[in-house]
Image (spheres, rainbow, N blue to C red):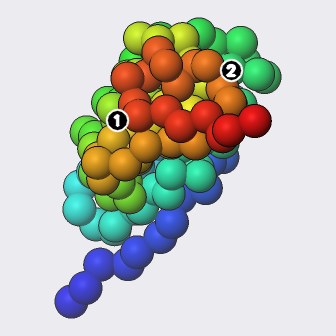
């Protein structure tokens, strides 16, 4: 018998991480526990990670270091299947280490993992040690 498969929305991760509102946090925790126990397969898309990072930063005021510190274990140790997990984990760590936006870190890690570069005017990519191509004037 195959397991049920669900894609987790950012609100599941956010309720679990913030504990707010309490009733939804408890329900999210139960869902994540079911995934950890192997009862269901809970998948996480990179867009959901990006939304979670953004809400934790903009609404809750958490630092990039704190966000990486809670998301990396959640995405790797709670029975979740995160699409492109290695790239996302490296991007979260790079975001915290280099003080850059998660989207930039994710783009840089995605490019680097494929041996490719990034086309951008954003100087933050220089911090990310990726082949940066600035379009000619």
Q: Can you say which quadrant of the picture contains the N terminus?
A: bottom left
Q: Earlier in the sequence, mark 2 or mark 1?
A: 2
Reading the image, the residue beneath label 1 is 89
Farthest residue to the front: give it.
137
Tell me how far mark 2 sits from mark 1, CA to CA.
17 Å
Reading the image, the residue beneath label 2 is 57
Q: Position of residue 19 (x, y in %)?
A: 60, 28
Return the residue nearer the eye: 131 or 94: 131
Looking at the rendering, which quadrant does residue 2 occupy? Answer: bottom left
- Where is 82 relative to 18, above or below? below
Q: Can you say which quadrant of the picture contains the C terminus?
A: top right
Q: Residue at x 38, y 78 (%)?
A: 4
Q: Is residue 132 left or right of residue 137?
A: left
Q: Position of residue 55 (x, y in %)?
A: 71, 31
Q: Is residue 110 visible?
A: yes
Looking at the rendering, which quadrant does residue 60 occupy? Answer: top right
Label 2: few (<14), some or many (≥20) within 10 Å?
some
Q: Residue at x 61, y 19 (%)?
A: 123
Q: Position of residue 27 (x, y in %)?
A: 56, 48
Q: How many marks?
A: 2
Q: Residue at x 51, y 51 (%)?
A: 46
Q: Is residue 33 visible?
A: no
Looking at the rendering, which quadrant does residue 131 occupy? Answer: top left
Instruction: Kindly indicate whether the residue at mark 1 contacts the one at mark 2 (C-beta within 8 angstroms).
Output: no
- Where is 50 relative to 4, above or below? above
Q: Is residue 84 left or right of residue 56?
A: left
């Amino acid at each position: 018998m195959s397991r049920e498969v669900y894609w987790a929305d950012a609100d599941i991760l956010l309720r679990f991480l913030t504990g707010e509102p309490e009733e939804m946090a408890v329900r999210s925790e139960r869902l994540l526990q079911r995934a950890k126990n192997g009862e269901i397969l809970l998948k996480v898309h990179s867009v959901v990670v990006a939304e979670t990072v953004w809400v934790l930063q903009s609404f809750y005021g958490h630092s990039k270091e704190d966000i990486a510190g809670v998301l990396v274990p959640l995405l790797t140790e709670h029975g979740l299947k995160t699409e492109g997990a290695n790239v996302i984990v490296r991007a979260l760590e790079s975001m915290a280490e280099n003080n850059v936006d998660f989207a930039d870190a994710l783009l840089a890690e995605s490019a680097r993992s494929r041996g490719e570069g990034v086309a951008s005017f954003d100087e933050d990519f220089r911090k990310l040690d990726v082949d940066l191509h600035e379009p000619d004037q």
